[in-house]
Image (cartoon, rainbow, N blue to C red):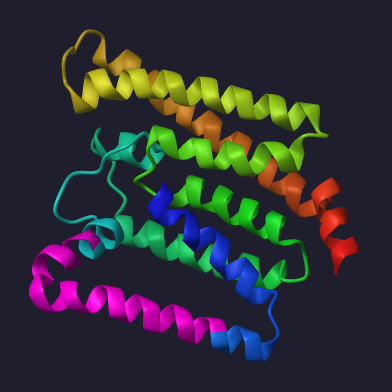
Amino acid sequence: MDKNASHFLIPPFLIKQKRKEFVRHLFIIAITSLVITAPFLLLAFNEFTWFIKFYLFGTGEELQGISLWRLLDANGVSIPSFFLIIILLFAIVTLYVKFRGESVWKMVLLSMIVYFVFYPKIHYEYYLMLFAVAIPYLIEKRNLVAMLYVVSLLTSITLLIEQRYLDWKTTTYAYPIFVSIAIGCMVAVDIILIYIFYHVSKSKTWIDSVEENRA
């Protein structure tokens, strides 16, 4: 998840910048990225671009993780990763346009929720980042914080099933039942996240007030 953290943090901060600062920061990011990636592109093009192909197009290896999409894919219901990522990118861009006047924290949290719903390669430990962002933001809303604990429980159940039945393949006992439970857990997780998204998009919290006062 650490490799994806900047994807959520940088855009909201850039959106808040004035045009001159926006262009300057964007230029710095582009040059820095080019300097870092150029040697790998020149010396190990195939190996380096493998990550792009895998994470964007889903080629190279089978889907891994505990996302609903991965569980469905492992059971014959395959939705192309590229299609899901296109939806994800469209949703995030739309989100930035709609909420550009809101707090950075809100934009980060909303974009992360969209990511967790649509990205097909979500791993269990990724949720730590979501909780780290969501809990401080929602701390005044006990019901929403409780829902995050439910998400933690459901993803833990899914992980136990996913590892034994899909990753390690150490057991096949009652496969349809347990894998169906895992799928049901992740459907419930996505429903909870969508509910939290709706609530966050419609309300303000103490962090929003702090950012407004600073502005």
**Left or right placement of residue 58 versus residue 2 in this view:** left
Q: Nearer the viewer, residue 111 or 81?
A: 111
The residue shown at (66%, 89%) is: 19
Furthest toward the top, the residue is 173
Magenta segment boundaries in residue numbering: 25-51
28 and 119: which is toward the camera: 28
39 lies above or below 61: below
Q: Left of 210 or right of it: where is 166?
A: left
Q: Residue at x 15, y 48 (%)?
A: 61
**Which residue is found at the position 68% from the left and 79% from the top?**
17
Of all residues, the one furthest to the right in this rendering is 213
Which of the 4 quarters of the picture holds residue 131? top right
Q: On the rendered structure, is 213 left or right of 143? A: right
Query: Which residue is nearer to you in this view: 71 or 101?
Result: 101
In the image, is residue 105 above or below residue 45?
A: above
Q: Position of residue 5 (x, y in %)?
A: 48, 54
Question: Does the rendering let one see residue 205?
Answer: no
Q: Position of residue 151 (x, y in %)?
A: 56, 28
- In which quadrant of the rendered view does residue 16 lie? bottom right
Residue 34: within the magenta?
A: yes
Q: Quadrant of the C terminus?
A: bottom right
Residue 187 seen by the camera? yes
